[in-house]
Amino acid sequence: MYLIQILLPLYANDGRQFSQSEYIRVRDELTDAFGGLTTYVRSPAEGLWKESGSATVYDDIVIYEVMTEVLDRSWWHDYRAELALRFQQEVLIVRVSEVQLL
């Protein structure tokens, strides 16, 4: 079993907040493809990283999770690239963990 997490920013690089319809679209796409999902949207997580020396960059993010028996890396590669364009990101994090259900 695989757990896939998608980290989506709340704001574009120019500070504009993305429309709620963008997140609904992702929710619907993932639900259609995988039969369900979990979202963490009530209190956004904050991502921090160092860029160009000492400057700290941060993002408010929401996390979408899906679980699947089969990991289709090609599909995820293409979907990540599409989301990066839609959310205007140079790099958009989609990560996977292999999990065992207890």
Image (cartoon, rainbow, N blue to C red):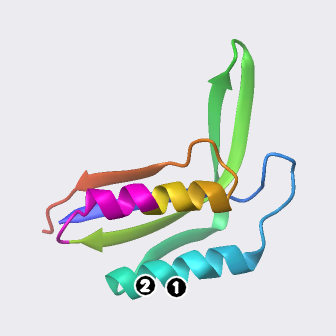
Residue 28's label in the rendered image is 1
Instruction: Give the residue at x 34% y 87%.
Output: 35
- Please give the name of the residue rendered at 60% of the width and 80% of the height, measured from the top-left corner: 25
Check the image and report above or below for 79 versus 34.
above
In the image, the segment drawn in magenta is: 69-78
Image vertical order of residue 17 relative to residue 54, above or below: below
Residue receiving disc 2? 31
Asked if disc 2 and disc 1 are in contact, CB closer than 8 Å, the reply is yes
Q: Is residue 49 above or below residue 14?
A: above
Q: Nearer the viewer, residue 43 or 53?
A: 53
Q: Which one is nearer the viewer's eye here, 46 or 20?
A: 20
| Secondary structure category for the residue under label 2 | helix
Q: Residue furthest top?
A: 53
Residue 77 locus on image (x, y percent)? 39, 55
Split into 4 quadrants, where in the image is the C terminus? bottom left
Whole-percent x, y for residue 52 in the image: 70, 16
Residue at horizontal 32 percent and vertical 53 percent from the top? 96
Q: Judge whether residue 74 is colored magenta.
A: yes
Where on the picture, by quarter, is residue 4?
A: bottom left
Q: Main secondary structure of the magenta part?
A: helix
Mark 2 residue crowding within 10 angstroms, few (<14) / some (14–19) / many (20+): some
Give the image location of residue 43, x and y in percent: 67, 64
SS at circle 1: helix
Picture quadrant of residue 2: bottom left
The reply to whether residue 100 is visible in this rendering is: yes
Q: What amino acid does circle 2 point to?
A: Thr
